[in-house]
Amino acid sequence: MSNHKLRRGTFLHVESELYAYHDTRKEIIRLKNEILYCSGSGDDENVGGGRSNLPGDPTGRTAVLLTTHKKLEQLQAISDAIEAVYGALGPEKQRLIRLRYWTRPQTLTWEGIAKEIPAHRATVIRWRDEIIRMIAERIGWR
């Protein structure tokens, strides 16, 4: 892990993705279901000629759509990065993420989170900075 400083906007973006992690997982499932079960528009944009460049078989078409869907690809990259970093963390740091980002409604201050873990407030904030940097690095953001 390099110790480069993240831009403030990147830091805040990664933090917002941590807050929205569970919603992101739901959106990934929704998009996959939409692609798999064609609940989106089945419009044929190839009006008036030639053959489509998508495979003729439904399984092949679904595979192509799943691998080329940009929004799904971005959400999956963010989700994968969060899961990989979370999985590599020790129990105290995982608890920090659960308490700070995944507990709703959020009622704890940094002092309250530090008491729950237990650790010093400055240590908990340093852990947060480290976790955000690790996630950003894994996604490829700077």
Image: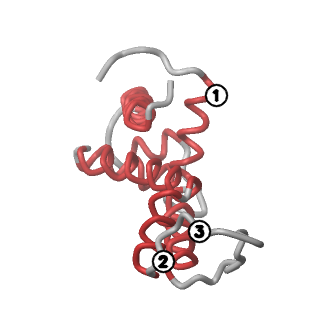
Q: Nearer the viewer, mark 2 or mark 1?
A: 2
Specify the quadrant of the image occupied by residue 13: top right
Label pair 2/1, CB-CB below 8 angstroms: no
How far apart in space, not on screen, are marks 2 and 1 (Cα)? 44 Å
Describe the element under mark 2 as helix, strand or loop.
loop
Residue at 67% of width from left, 80% of height from top? 42
Q: Amino acid at mark 1?
A: Gly
How far apart in space, not on screen, are marks 2 and 3 (Cα)? 8 Å
Label pair 3/1, CB-CB below 8 angstroms: no
In the drawing, does residue 108 fall left or right of residue 67?
Answer: right
Q: Amino acid at mark 2?
A: Gly
User: For mark 1, what is the residue?
Assistant: 9
Residue at 47% of width from left, 71% of height from top? 55
User: For mark 3, what is the residue?
Assistant: 52
Describe the element under mark 1 as helix, strand or loop.
helix
Quadrant position of the N terminus in the picture: top left
The answer to which of marks 2 and 1 sits earlier in the sequence is 1
User: For mark 2, what is the residue?
Assistant: 56
Specify the quadrant of the image occupied by residue 133: top left
